[in-house]
Image: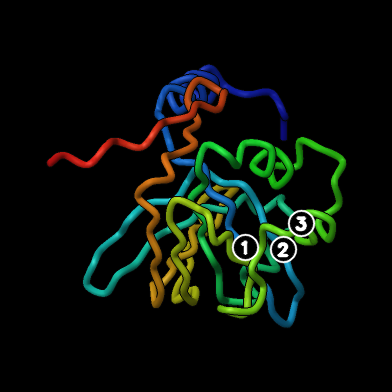
Amino acid sequence: MSDELTSTQREFRTAMANLSAAVNVVTTDGVSGRAGITVSAVCSVTDTPPTLLVCVNQASYTHDIFRTNRRVAINVLGPQHEELAMQFAGATTVPMAERFALPMWDHDTHGLPVLPDAAVVVIGPVGAEFTRGTHTVLFVEVDHVSVREETGALLYFQRRFHQLAPVAAST
């Protein structure tokens, strides 16, 4: 099998680079250990019951950890988290254990790593999964949500991070 991309694959990747997305660090802890990964492929599925999907590349060493632990926290990053996003994307040499040793993490409240200052934190068990091509889609059944509306957002667009300031509440 060739590693060379087809023209359709190249065009698809370029198109997807122009689809802005929130930046998330998805974390887990459990029988297979603690792990986290930066992902932009997180999407609402339904609110009855509240469910999100998270796409994880099967080539990522975190893939099987998520599937085995079966419980995740989706930390939707704010503008202040760009360096953290790079670490969990594997773009630095910081080992996984050191990433989670940073004082910003709450490891105790929910039994898995959570960023208390994230724009949004959604937690729940993986209820189902579906494999397509190189990725596994994990369906997360939401049992906890916290929102910090004053935080703003970290977005990924055209292969770069962008910071979005919070919108002032209208009076």
Name the residue that disc number 1 marks. 27
The image shows residue 79 at horizontal and vertical percentages of: 52, 36
When the figure is inspected, residue 30 is found, relative to residue 27, above or below; the finding is below
The image shows residue 11 at horizontal and vertical percentages of: 48, 18
In the rendered image, the residue lying farthest to the left is 171
Please name the amino acid that badge 1 sits on.
Thr
Q: Quadrant of the C terminus?
A: top left
- Total count of labels: 3
In the rendered image, the residue lying farthest to the front is 171
- Provide the secondary structure element on which disc 3 rests: loop
Name the residue that disc number 3 marks. 102
For marks 2 and 3 on the same chain, the one whose residue lies earlier in the sequence: 2
> How would you rate the neighbour count of disc 2 (Cα within 10 Å): few for under 14, some for 14-19, many for 20 or more?
many
In the rendering, which numbered label is found on residue 48? none
For marks 3 and 1 on the same chain, the one whose residue lies earlier in the sequence: 1
Please name the amino acid that badge 2 sits on.
Ala
Quarter residue 89 falls in: top right
- Provide the secondary structure element on which disc 1 rests: strand
Foreground pick, 51 / 75: 75
> How would you rate the neighbour count of disc 3 (Cα within 10 Å): few for under 14, some for 14-19, many for 20 or more?
few
Please name the amino acid that badge 3 sits on.
Leu
When the figure is inspected, residue 9 is found, relative to residue 142, above or below; the finding is above
Name the residue that disc number 2 marks. 35
Q: Are marks 2 and 3 in contact (CB under 8 Å)?
A: no
